[in-house]
Amino acid sequence: MNRRTLVIGASAIGLAAFGGGAIVMTRNRQAEAEAQAAAAPAADMELLVRGYSPSFGPEDAPVTLVEFFDPSCEACRAFHPVVQDILTQFPDQVRVVMRYAAFHEGSDEAVGILETARMQDQFEPVLDALLERQPEWAVHGAPRLDLAWQIAGAAGLDLEKAQSMRLSPDIVGILNQDASDLETLGVRQTPTFFLDGRQLTNVTFESLISDVRNAVETS
């Protein structure tokens, strides 16, 4: 074995050790973040759930999952089937509450569409339709809200009534209240989930289902 081989071998060992150390550090940081989140006091449920907040599942369910979402958010669209799956798996044990976080351009108007849909008892089909076709209308920098309205209309929204209601004081008040709650709770990104008052961190599809399952089993 010559010197060059020894150098290459030593380098490879060093890189492997560095890589292993980086993984351990990442896991340690994640564990620390999760421990800090678990130790943090639960948020005030009055901040998490407002009387107007759209929700699915029994109001007296033992477990409450609150999602702060933006109808223009791609990650929110990706998590939507996971949230629906949770409701399917735990129909009597889990209540899901939706809160608005209109961070993207045009999202305030999209929230207006959803709120008019809620007032017409069409929230769920309109939400599903807007998220399904989100790539068509939620174009970053140039959102096509006219198309979003068309999609909502095709999903069952009475557009004439909705257009006259979307700037009503009630809807403006909801947008303002949700924005205030976001600030108080420190929510900076979407989706952000709170499970029984505690904010979840490093959320994945799998971890969300697992956390909810654990909450159901211990409730």
Image (cartoon, helix red, strand yellow):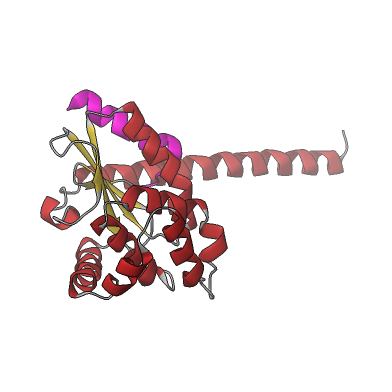
Q: Residue at x 26, y 63 (%)?
A: 186
Q: Is residue 136 above or below residue 57?
A: below
Q: At which x and y percent is residue 205?
A: 44, 39
Q: At which x and y percent is residue 210?
A: 36, 31
Q: Residue at x 50, y 51 (%)?
A: 132
Q: Main secondary structure of the magenta part?
A: helix
Q: Is residue 185 above or below residue 11?
A: below
Q: Is residue 83 magenta?
A: no
Q: Residue at x 19, y 48 (%)?
A: 40
* Residue 161 visible within the image: yes
* Residue 204 visible within the image: no
Residues in magenta, as a range: 201-219
Q: Residue at x 41, y 42 (%)?
A: 28
Q: Is residue 189 above or below residue 206?
A: below
Quadrant that contains the C terminus: top left
**Quarter of the rendering containing residue 119:** bottom left
Q: At which x and y percent is residue 135?
A: 56, 59
